[in-house]
Image (cartoon, helix red, strand yellow):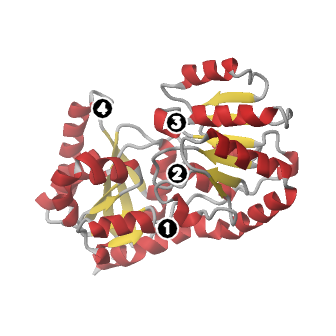
Amino acid sequence: MAYEIVCCLELSDALVCHYLTPIARHPSVSRVWIVRSRVSRYAEIPKSEYVLTPQSPKPRRWLRMRKECLRLGERPEVAAFVSFNPIPYGLIAERAARRHGKPMHFGFIGSDWYRDVAGAWGRWTLPTFAGADFLTATGKRMRDEMVARGLAAEKIAVLPHCVDLERFTVAEPDAAGYDFVFVGQLIRRKRVDLILRAFRKILDRYPAARLCIVGDGPRRDELEALALLLELSGAVDFVGYTYDVQRYLADARMVVIASYREGFPFALVEGMCCGLVPVATPVGTIPDLIADGENGLLFEEDDAGALAACLERLLGDGEVYRRLRARVLEMRPDFSYRRATEVWDPWLESLAS
């Protein structure tokens, strides 16, 4: 029996596609209703239909989302609600799910768990999340924390971050124009300033090294000014936000993440699927998939010297780079949409029965 799923979320256009495409590809799902303020320009999600809400101030938008979720919940074809970033979008969908007596999923992706639920909001929201029918986490560490806080282990699955492998093809490192690439929002917790300072430390020894910063955000002007202050002109390119991120991944050799808080960022997955060696902080569930010296390099957060040592090691030791890259490429099939669909399969199949 085929049925419909309602999803309430915002997120970036790319993340909407990465999270919802595996659900839409499941054979039991006939349609995915996406309650959101805009259509994703990143890629088309199969079997999906958008229910757009005004890009107005958040309280007004949230009320409209609630109204649309309640309306969709009246459809007999709708079997369940799913969400990502549960605060507030999952909580909005949960009201409609409970009103109509339909199953509810909450998907945690990073800061929504580590900052919100494990932090200030947990006291009020954990009882609601405990009543969910299905929960997903980004890795074992997050799942263990969820269980420790009283959420039922049998309801929680680790949902791998997966991408379209046909889109993120393996790059040729010998032809790369950049040694390192960062992909993400230019916000404080991403610590792009630390990446710039570490990059400055290695330039005297490797003056031909190049760094690409892909993304936009409120700190862009400040970071560009820092690059000028550090005399990085000509060695660092700020290319802004783009839907064609794989273009820059295909033109790099290593992907760098310096965040002090993450789940497991999709930038690492996208980079690794292109054959880029990851250099990252051991925060969130990153250590679940990246082991230092085995398939990437890890450095402690807020340590520009440690990051510089990692960058220098990869530039100076070709054997280490080739060994890590080979292990990264072995992991590539683990990031296919099919693997994510397999995680959804038991719950989605249970809805049909």
Label 2: few (<14), some or many (≥20) within 10 Å? many
For the point 66% across and 28% down, which residue is it? 238
- Quarter of the picture holding the N terminus: bottom left
Numbered circle sitting on residue 54: 4
Q: Counting residues from the N terminus, which is met first, the one under dot 4 or under dot 2? A: 4
Q: Residue 194: horizontal and vertical position, in percent?
A: 60, 35
Label 3: few (<14), some or many (≥20) within 10 Å? some
Q: Residue 36: horizontal and vertical position, in percent?
A: 34, 42
Q: Counting residues from the N terminus, which is met first, the one under dot 1 or under dot 3? A: 3
Q: Quadrant of residue 181?
A: top right
Q: Dot 2 corresponds to which residue?
A: 265
Q: Counting residues from the N terminus, which is met first, the one under dot 2 or under dot 3? A: 3
Indicate left or right for 263 with 275 as reference: left
Q: Quadrant of residue 42?
A: top right
Q: Counting residues from the N terminus, which is met first, the one under dot 1 or under dot 2? A: 2
Q: CA distance from mark 1 to mark 3?
A: 25 Å
Q: Residue 215: horizontal and vertical position, in percent?
A: 58, 34
Q: Is residue 53 visible?
A: yes
Q: CA distance from mark 4 to mark 1?
A: 31 Å
* Amino acid type, mark 2: Pro
Q: Is residue 199 above or below residue 351?
A: above
Q: Nearer the viewer, mark 1 or mark 2?
A: 2
* Amino acid type, mark 3: Gln
Numbered circle sitting on residue 340: 1
For the point 14% across and 65% down, which residue is it? 101
Q: Dot 3 corresponds to which residue?
A: 185
Q: Secondary structure at mark 3?
A: loop
